[in-house]
Image (cartoon, grey):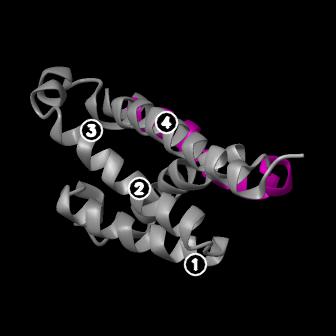
Amino acid sequence: MTNVDDTKQTAGVGYILLSFALWMMVEFVTVWQAKMDEWMSLMPWVLIQYLAIIMVFWYFIFRRNWSERNVLLLMLTVMYVFEFLWQTPFLRNPVTFIPGSLLLASIWGFLTFFPWWLSQRTLRRHKLQAVACILWIPVGFIIACFMA
């Protein structure tokens, strides 16, 4: 028989590790693949930033036991704060703000909820949400093709 706290702690560690791996992959694909030298020049600050974001979500998911709705609201808040700090171009343009927000919500949802569902082994219960979270992949591919 496993202890609930041990299971929760294991899921929390799994969340952190999986989330960090996904952040590294997604950031490389969406932002840094063409600017590898710049990305490397920002190390270790970039890694610390990713870990700080992950730890905020980890805290509210695994320590505070927030509901998915509350985590979604937190995610949107954190997303807008960071994306404006990073000066994401399509958030600064009124024409692209809404489509850009939807794309960013899909990416951030993928980075926030996929590791949570995988670490908790609840991905099957979240099929529809999971599809919404991976929509950024084909959209990102299309955007990359047009930007190349």
Nearer to us: label 1 or label 2 = 2
Q: Amino acid at mark 2?
A: Met
Q: Residues within 10 Å of mark 3 (few under 14, many from 20)?
A: some
Viewer-nearest residue: 97 or 28: 28
Which callout, 2 or 3, points to the residue nearer the camera?
Answer: 2
Q: In terms of sequence position, does the residue under pointer 4 or pointer 2 come before the other?
A: 4
- The answer to whether 3 appears left or right of 83 in the picture is right
Label 4, label 2: how far apart the Cα atoms are: 14 Å
126 or 133, which is in the foreground? Answer: 126
User: Mark 2 or mark 3: which comes first in sequence?
Assistant: 3
Q: Which residue is mark 4?
A: 22
- Pointer 1: what residue? 70
* Residue under label 2: 55
How crowded pointer 2 is (Cα within 10 Å; few <14, some 14-19, many 20+) is rated as some
Query: Which region shows up in magenta?
Result: 122-144
SS label for mark 1: helix
Residue 76 place in picture, x, y as percent = 45, 70
In the rendering, at what x and y percent does residue 120 appear? 73, 50
In the depicted structure, whether residue 34 falls above or below residue 99: above
Q: Which residue is mark 3?
A: 47
Q: Residue furthest right?
A: 1
